[in-house]
Amino acid sequence: MSFISRDIPGLGRITTSIKLCEDTVVQFRGVPYGVVEQRFRQPQLCETWGGGSFEASKFGPACPSPATIFNLVGATLKAHEREGQVPADEFRCLNLNITTPIEIASNLLPVSIYFHGGMNCTSSANLPGYNPGNLVRLSMRLGSPIIVVTVNFRLGAFGFMASEDLKADNREAGYRGVGNYALYDQYTALKWVKKYIAGFGGDPDQITAIGQSSGASDLHILMMSDLLRSEALLKQAVIISGNAVMTSRELEHQQRIYDKFLEHLQIPLTLSPADRLARLRAVKQQDLTSAYACLGSPLPNWQATVDGVVLKTLPTCDRMSSQTYALSIKRIMVGDCEQEGILWGERIRQKHWTATKVFELLRTYFDPDDVSDILRQYEIAGGDSDQDLTTKLIKFCGEVEFKQPLYELAVNWKNGDAFYYHMRFINHFEGRFKGSAHHGVDLLFFFQTYNHVLSEEYEAVAEQMGKHFIKFISGGSPWDPFNKAGRCLSYGPEWVSVIKRDEAHSWQHQKEVGCNDWHEKCTLVSRDLRGEVVYKK
């Protein structure tokens, strides 16, 4: 077995035996970027390797998450036997995987950093579907080689728990804010890559961060925050099927989540704050993830907290036109899928909605004329079958939660060019989303990992998508900017073409009537439709 080594200034020598794509690509796995000293605390940057060296042939631990399997795309990829299963570890999960051309280039290469999705609750950068070896190989074949970094970070309660107890505890320890530990992990990963990627052949001044689903929401929040405003860590960002509006909550909401956990874990509220927190920190990690079921699902969504530091105010779509971002981020790409809302289809079905019930729900938020317009825009009528009504409500939720915030982000981007793509190719694999262009279907194409199980047509689409992303990461323009030309790239339904991208149906009416909190009301309706509880003062 032969090893590949790199000497990283300030850290030491790193070696790996992982060579991919006919020995043209090398992968350094499980590289620590941060240190977690205690549960529910912000991380510290990893700036030393014990003994001045690191062996990077094995994946590092991922964050503990529920055992429930959640596979969006249906297709499965068998992990290589050498990859193995690494036990989850909340204190050692701050690690990343670096995939580069095996030959060191004469010039520093553009870098992409990927934050995975999974409701901020599950998944891992170690999954075979996220292995960027084929993407790096494609970039080499195109003559525009890139480096791709995939990041593990804290999830669920470990990354997002927040409460007044934790706020006081964090303040006493010298930390500002509360919760958002996962976002600090991601921020720390960006700092680590900026500081050390040159040793791997990467250009620290040409870094593109990519987030998908909850990873995109986290990245969008970081782009707004003072964390990225104070340091030029990114030059570009890609936001795929996620946004800050979806995954941000007030501390009052998070406090109720915290209280539910204390009750479920039989930690008395009569204890002092310090004792309550000590008991919670002592809970075994597998028992903590098992307790997620107390929130109504074994795989609940976890959200960032408005803490006055990372998030100063609750993001809303209505404020997107005036939202500013870190000036170092010059260009962005955003993407969505045709049927994003199908992700919540089962939840909506379980609520047994009728047209009358939908009408009554809308009346709690809107005037009669506005209610009539929404019903007309989405063609909701009393004669709808259960399936037809569910399909229409899925469309409403998808447009409100995904499409409109991404549209507003792209059309109002002021730092430079904003590119937009829309995925319309459907999933042909067996599974709950077969036959739809569902949330996450673009994962079948982007990383090039599924090419060997795709049809000839879809393999060509995957390669085309890879070329577009590589061009963007390398500083080129994959198509005309949306914020200048008003048009986006459509993958499907037949091939790749440029189309006009309009606002959501309901948003067009909002601009006609001039209602400033229209999207906020629509978001509350969407959450009611799928049964999500949002706690307020």
Image (spheres, rainbow, N blue to C red):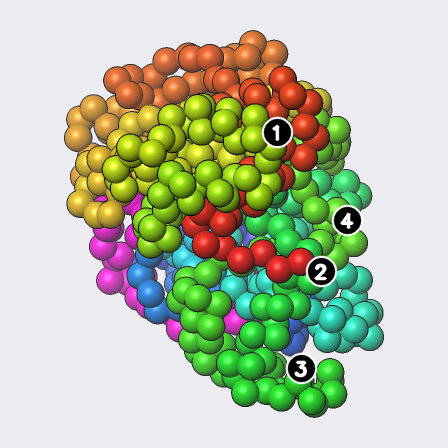
Mark nearer the N terminus (4 vs 2): 4
Looking at numbered disc 2 in the image, what kind of residue is underneath it?
Lys
Distance Cα–Cα, label 3 vs label 1: 38 Å
Q: Is residue 212 left or right of residue 260?
A: left
Secondary structure under badge 4?
loop
Say few, some or many: other residues with alpha carbon within 10 Å of mark 4 (under 14 / 14 to 19 / 20 or more): some
Residue at mark 1: 409
- Alpha carbon separation for disc pair 1 and 2: 29 Å
* Amino acid at dot 4: Lys
Nearest to N terminus: mark 1 or mark 2 = 1
Q: CA distance from mark 3 to mark 4?
A: 25 Å
Q: Which residue is mark 2?
A: 537
- Nearest to the observer: residue 116 or residue 422: 422
Residue 508 is one of the magenta-drawn residues: no
Instruction: Quote the CA–CA distance across marks 2 and 3.
Output: 23 Å
Q: Quadrant of residue 256?
A: bottom right
What range of the chain is rendered magenta? 71-94
